[in-house]
Image (tube, rainbow, N blue to C red):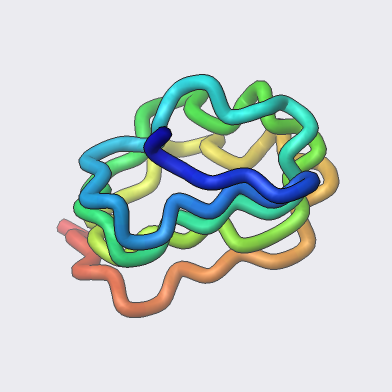
Amino acid sequence: SQCSCSGKTVDCYSRSLASVPAGIPTTTQVLGLSSNQITKLEPGVFDRLTALQSRVNAGQLKSIPRGAFDNLKSLTHIWLYNNPWDCA
């Protein structure tokens, strides 16, 4: 498995992922993506994860598509530090 699951937490920490893995349970509340090689988020990648509350973090992001978090009505915390942003 690319990630480990415990209750409503999915931990994908340091798995050499290049993208957010498919098949994350829709009931996931906490999603850890740090220490991977995810450089961009595909539009709609989180749309099914409407229960997500915190820790959508990825350390290699250069940009985020407009509306990436619009469907995450329960989202209270997001960590986006230490990313090599491309603001051009």
Q: Is residue 41 placed above or below 25 in the rendered structure? A: below
Left or right: 64 as drawn, with respect to 71 = left
Left or right: 67 as drawn, with respect to 51 = left
Residue at screen point 67% across, 22% down: 48
Residue at screen point 67% across, 27% down: 25
Left or right: 11 as drawn, with respect to 88 = right
Q: Position of residue 49 (x, y in %)?
A: 69, 31
Q: Position of residue 69 (x, y in %)?
A: 61, 42
Quadrant (top left, top right, bottom left, bottom right) of the C terminus: bottom left
Q: Is residue 22 placed above or below 58 in the rendered structure? A: above
Q: Is residue 86 placed above or below 46 in the rendered structure? A: below
Residue at screen point 22% across, 41% down: 18
Q: Position of residue 67 (x, y in %)?
A: 55, 35
Q: Position of residue 21 (x, y in %)?
A: 40, 31
Taking depth in this image into account, of 46 and 30 the one nearest to the observer is: 30
Residue at screen point 47% across, 61% down: 57
Q: Is residue 19 placed above or below 58 in the rendered structure? A: above
Q: Residue furthest bottom?
A: 82
